[in-house]
Image: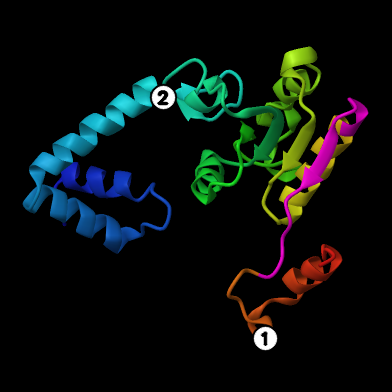
Amino acid sequence: MFSPLIEDLIRALRCLPGVGPKSAQRMAMYLLEKDRDAAGLLAHSLQQAVERVGRCSRCRTLTEQAVCALCNNTRRDHSLLCVVETPADVLAIEQAGNYHGLYFVLHGHLSPIDGVGPADLGLDLLGERLGEQEEERIAELIIATNPTVEGEATAQFIAERARAKGVKVSRIAHGVPIGGELEYIDGGTLAHAFNSRTAL
């Protein structure tokens, strides 16, 4: 129906999460019909990002620097290390504004079925960070993996190794969201909320 180049563009846009055939077609038509300047800017920015963005050598978040701005920030608490699954999780925590420590990004979770093991998550580098001495010593490891079966298994795996190095380990709380109504909360979330309750 479309020319080969347009078909290629539609196929390429479908790689984005949540973008199906119709959405990809609409995006392609918009860029080609209505805003070719934006299409060129998008293509240039994407090419630059693909070529220049890598992983921070300390925390593994996405950056074009060898060590990211967060790891280089001397005003952050370098004794706190929060483990997250994705760079998007770092952004979410930063936007909340109440955490001022450092991060370690796994880029996934343990999943033997999918062939994802400790080495794929950079857990050797995390082990080195936890074993550092004196001024770089991690006093507390905060695990903020997702509350999925794989996320919980990953959290347990990391916690065991951190405790073996004498590092205090904590897990972010999961439960009833602020503004949520109990009748609409699923049973698993309610059970977790009761098990994680704190004194008032």
Q: Is residue 111 visible?
A: yes
Nearer the observer, 176 or 73: 73
Quadrant that contains the C terminus: bottom right
Residue neighbourhood size for the residue with mark 1, other residues' Cα within 10 Å, grouped as few (<14), some (14–19), many (≥20): few
The mark that comes first in sequence, 1 or 2, is: 2
Give the mark toward the camera: 1 or 2: 1
Residue 186 belongs to magenta span: no
Residue 164 belongs to magenta span: yes
- Residue behind mark 1: 183
Q: Amino acid at mark 1?
A: Glu
- Span colored in magenta: 163-176
State the residue at coordinates (68%, 82%). 182
Q: Measured from the top left, where is residue 65 in percent x and y?
A: 44, 18
Color scheme of the displayed model: rainbow
Quadrant that contains the N terminus: bottom left
- Residue behind mark 2: 53
State the residue at coordinates (48%, 29%). 62
Q: Measured from the top left, where is residue 194 in percent x and y?
A: 82, 70
Q: Amino acid at mark 2?
A: Val
* Residue 199 appears left or right of 172: right
* Residue 108 appears left or right of 137: left
Q: Measured from the top left, where is residue 57 in percent x and y?
A: 58, 18
Nearer the observer, 11 or 142: 142
Nearer the observer, 95 or 32: 95
